[in-house]
Amino acid sequence: MTTTDIIRQSNLIALTGGIGSGKSVVQRILTALGYPVYDCDSRARALMATPAITASLADAFGYGIFDSRGSLDRRVLASIVFSDPDSLDRLNSITHAAVRADLNRWASGHCRHGIAFVETAILYQSGIDKMVGRVWEVTAPRDIRISRISIRNGWTTGEITARIDIQDSFIATDPHPRVDVIVNDGSSPILPRIENLIAQSNPL
């Protein structure tokens, strides 16, 4: 990560939380309320299909990560990087700078007249914590997260717990100073919490 690709936007809020925590539910509510949300996962997918990043991925992991049509096989890539921390670091070094640059361009237009959001599961690892003025962290109990992921993705329990363990094992050495928590356990009402946080976050 370089300092030249980090631009902090005070009106940009990070929406974060581990896999299965329910970030997407909060994202859909924000979108329905009319707030722009940058989805790091979908943008990373699009950026990873560009020729420059495709070439970097092939150099790092070989052509076995692509299917017979030449498209990236994300499940194969995931099986490599989530069982080997060094491979995960290589993947992150390829994708994070591209996402930050893309987010910089997006935020420069969307944060001019009010708050905007960026959804990311890897806030600190990606360097996006340095780009936002506030963080909303979505949480849920582990068993609920496992159930959600199993229903949504059809992964085995072993695949799910491996992904959760890697994400949850990370501890930020320099946590963001402005973090608000949203509990999304399926029973706690989240809309009032979101509305309250929006009222706190909107510029005067």
Image (spheres, rainbow, N blue to C red):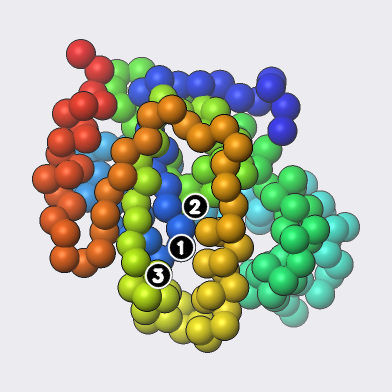
The amino acid sitting under disc 2 is Ala
Q: Is residue 117 visible?
A: no
* Disc 1 residue type (three-letter): Ile
User: Marks 2 and 1: in contact by CB < 8 Å?
Assistant: yes
| Left/right of residue 10 with respect to residue 127 in the rendered view | left
**The furthest residue to the top:** 204
- For badge 3, the amino acid type reads Arg
Q: Is disc 3 surrounded by few (<14), some (14 to 19) or many (20+) residues within 10 Å?
A: some
Image quarter for residue 80? bottom right
Q: Nearer the viewer, mark 3 or mark 1?
A: 3
The residue beneath circle 3 is: 142
- The residue under label 1 is 19
| Residue at 75% in and 61% down | 85
Q: Which residue is mark 2?
A: 121
Q: Helix, strand, or loop for circle 3? A: helix
CB-based contact (under 8 Å), mark 3 and mark 2:
no
Mark 3 against mark 2, which lies toward the viewer? 3
Give the residue displayed 62% in from the left and 49% down from the top. Answer: 47
